[in-house]
Amino acid sequence: MAKVSGSVEEVVHPLSFSTSQEAWEKLNEYFLKHHRKLFESGSSYTSGMSASFNIFVKIKKAWVDPDFDYGRMFNYKGQKWTTLVNNYLNLNKLDLLRSKVRYFQSKNNQNYNISYSFDNTHDNGKGCLLAATFSRRLNDDIPVITMVLRSSEITKRLIFDLLLIQRMGEYVYGEHQTFMINIYAIQMYCNTETLVLYHGHKDIRELLEGKNTSWTKNVLITLNKFLNEPTTFGSYKVFLRTAKSLSPEAFKNQGHVVTHLYAKDLKLEYDDIEYPDDCITLSQRKKFKQKFINKNKRNEDLQ
């Protein structure tokens, strides 16, 4: 049976964390434990899915561990990052935003709020990222990026989105500028089959020790099945991803190999090449850049 906590009135859940990495960790642990900060009111859950609404997260420093391994944790390949960037970012629009920010930064008055609306170019895209506003307040040395999310799956998707926000900030401000992140999420949610992926980061059994609710029992039952019977989930993509991530050795005879995909290798490339107006995605720019480099090399060889 589905359960709804609190009244039907809108409730805002304010949270504050030191870094993006800590935000991801604590949010997953709050969902694992059904922490009162998210589930005392303004939330709902069934035996296999939980959701909390109107969450405002303040992150003091945009930082995901450079050695965070998306390949080992979620069985992601490099194409996953390229698809995310191509789906949500129009790099020409981001270039324009960067130019506006730098214009304001060159003035004595550095108070600005410049918004970026995310694209959603794929037919199967879920449109989870809505907008990002780049802001700086008078007498404040640290800018802030405020993100509005329609919805966020908190285990495998949120940590990817947090890295995307960080890379956008680095693209606009440079890698040496510290900046904060504010996130307003209309909904954050999880289901047990993806939430247990967190076990690859921290031992869920230790985190839930002493917790004895119907929700925590179901989480542990799901985790144990993925650990002890990983090949019984069939070919359903979501479940199979979790099974391969938590028990990769069980799929070796099927040719499965763990590939590493570190946060430090996932970036938005910045260069001074003047791209055509219709060259807006990361993959398009990579192709154009390679042609640009090859053309310049041929010209150098002819000289």
Image (spheres, rainbow, N blue to C red):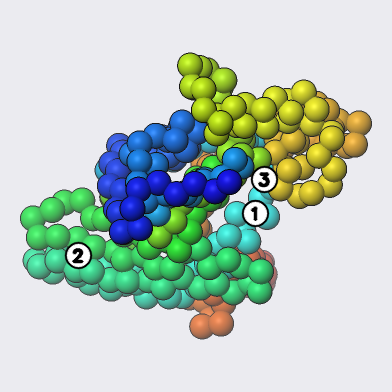
Per the image, the residue denoted by label 3 is 76
Along the line of sight, the residue nearer the viewer: 294 or 27 = 27
Image coords of residue 121 (percent x, y): 59, 74
Residue 144, image x and y in percent? 26, 55
Q: Quadrant of residue 250?
A: top right
Question: Mark 2 sits on what residue?
Answer: 105
287 over 170 or under it: above or below: below
Q: Tell me if residue 65 can be seen.
A: no
**For the residue marked with disc 3, what is the amino acid?**
Tyr
Q: Quadrant of residue 106?
A: bottom left
Q: How many marks?
A: 3
1 and 3 marks in contact (CB < 8 Å): yes
* As drawn, 285 above or below 4: below
Task: Estimate the spatial distance between the alpha carbons at disc 2 and disc 3, rounded to whole Å.
Answer: 38 Å
The residue lying at 55 percent from left, 34 percent from top is 215
- Disc 2 to disc 1: CB gap under 8 Å: no
Query: Does residue 92 appear anywhere in the picture?
Result: yes
What residue do we see at 59% from left, 27% from top?
217
* Element under disc 2: helix
Q: Secondary structure at mark 1?
A: helix
Q: Which mark is residue 80?
A: 1
Within 10 angstroms of label 1, few (less than 14), some, or many (20 or more) residues?
Answer: some
Instruction: Give the vertical position of 175 relative to 33 (above or below).
Output: below
Q: Secondary structure at mark 3?
A: loop
Mark 1 to mark 3: distance in Å? Answer: 6 Å
Q: Nearer the viewer, residue 180 or 58?
A: 58
- Dot 3 alpha-carbon crowd within 10 angstroms: few under 14, some 14 to 19, many 20 or more: some
Question: Is 161 placed left or right of 246 in the picture?
Answer: left
